[in-house]
Amino acid sequence: MMGGGSVYWGRKEKSKEVKGIVVIFAWISIHEKHLANYMDLYSSMGWNSLVARADFLNAFYPERAMSLAFVLVNELIEELKIRTCPVVFVAFSGSPKACMYKVFQIIQGTGESHLNLDGNHLVRSCVSGQIYDSSPIDFASDLNAQFVLHPSIRKMPGPSKLVSWIAKGVASGLDGLYLTGFESQRAEYWQTLYSSVDLDAPYLVLCSESDELAPYPVINNFAQCLQELGADIKVVKWNGSPHLEHYKYYPIQYRAAVASLLEKATSVYSHRIQKLRERNGMHDEISELICDLQKAAVNSNQSFRRVALGPSDHFFLPSSAEYHNGRESGSLQDEQRERPVSLPVPPSINAHSVLGQILFDACVPKNIEGWDIRFSGSAKGQPFGSARRHSPFLGIKCNRRSRL
């Protein structure tokens, strides 16, 4: 299903004095006038505000919540591409179920969400804090009736029993329609909220024992679970403020708690960016070192090719066969000193050419009877013929030790 609410900027200044972005998750239970007071509060502290106002049915239609979450994340990515800064999520009332938990799934790459990895990493690296005001709410069957009707309708004059009966009737219809999938959605909702610990951002929970829509036991259990998971969480509890009116009843304490969380979020973001820069700097140094080694290897290989492949050079290297045959005396260094390393190549005569054939016929007698070829009197253990054949053409002596 399409729709799901609206996304707009409550305050958007381009000044360098802006400290960060507060993403406000609002639901139908909060009035526009009250929402403007919170935007003024964050603006007075130097933070821009991006608002995601979800429709009532988003809590029952995950597709609508996901649609709104996509719009919000895309808008946030476009802004962070221009200038990165700390981002703090602020959730009011039932907005975590109506949109916020889907945003977590998008930036963490879980659920059915699909977004480019660069955008996920950008938002994750900037999320530096979370604030829950009269939230989160456990969307159980007995609580749905309290959120079915708009607050303005519930405050209308008339018999309260009639209004209550209508609310319970609508809630029962919704429960009967989505009974099979609602419990699984509820489990996914809480699991996603707990998984937000991986963002490594501090929490601030603002609640009251007088809040009937967001009962303190539910919020306290949520805070304890986060603390057991290793979260940095602070819970501020009041006694006399109703749902979503903590700022109205306790403005000084409320402002101090929010200011402390925003300051901590700024510190977390700065420390995180510093670590990323150090890590990237280390990778750059390693990359430069590897690049230098590769260049040195290429230059060395080219120099070797120039020596070995020169038109007037011979470069002798011991073969692997010489190592396997073994030696009774001498060393590899002695043999390498006895071998010629670089000699000019004189012009040679091919025995199969016309001039070679004439010289061969003139110098070699046709009758070789009477020649005494003895293999016992060999040069260094080789026959004369073989030693003569393997000697250099110009009579250059080549000393080799016996391998027999």
Image (cartoon, helix red, strand yellow):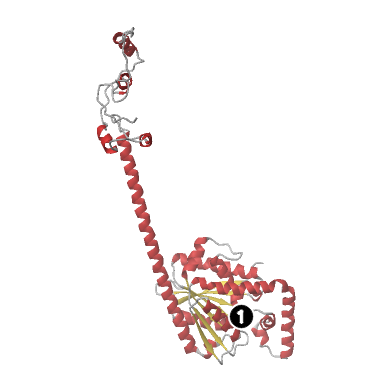
Expressed as whole percent of the image width and height from the top left, the position of residue 73 reads 54, 67
The quadrant holding residue 155 is: bottom right
Q: Residue furthest top?
A: 367
| In-image side of 345 versus 260 (left or right) | left
- The answer to whether residue 141 is left or right of residue 97 is right
Residue 372 is situated, as x and y percent measured from the top left of the image, at 31, 13
Q: Is residue 351 above or below residue 248?
A: above
The structure residue drawn at horizontal position 34% and vertical position 47%, both measured from the top left corner, is 295
Residue located at (32% from left, 47% from top):
296
Quadrant of residue 212 in the image?
bottom right
In x, y percent, where is residue 142?
A: 69, 82
- In the figure, 232 relative to 246: above or below? above
User: What is the secondary structure assignment of the residue under circle 1?
Assistant: loop
**Side (left or right) of 303 relative to 39:** left
Q: Would you place residue 353 above or below residue 345 in this image?
A: above
Residue matched to label 1: 137
Q: Is residue 18 visible?
A: no
Q: Residue at x 49, y 81 (%)?
A: 40
Position above or below: 402 against 93: above
Residue shown at 60% from the left, 88% from the top: 211
Q: Amino acid at mark 1?
A: Ile
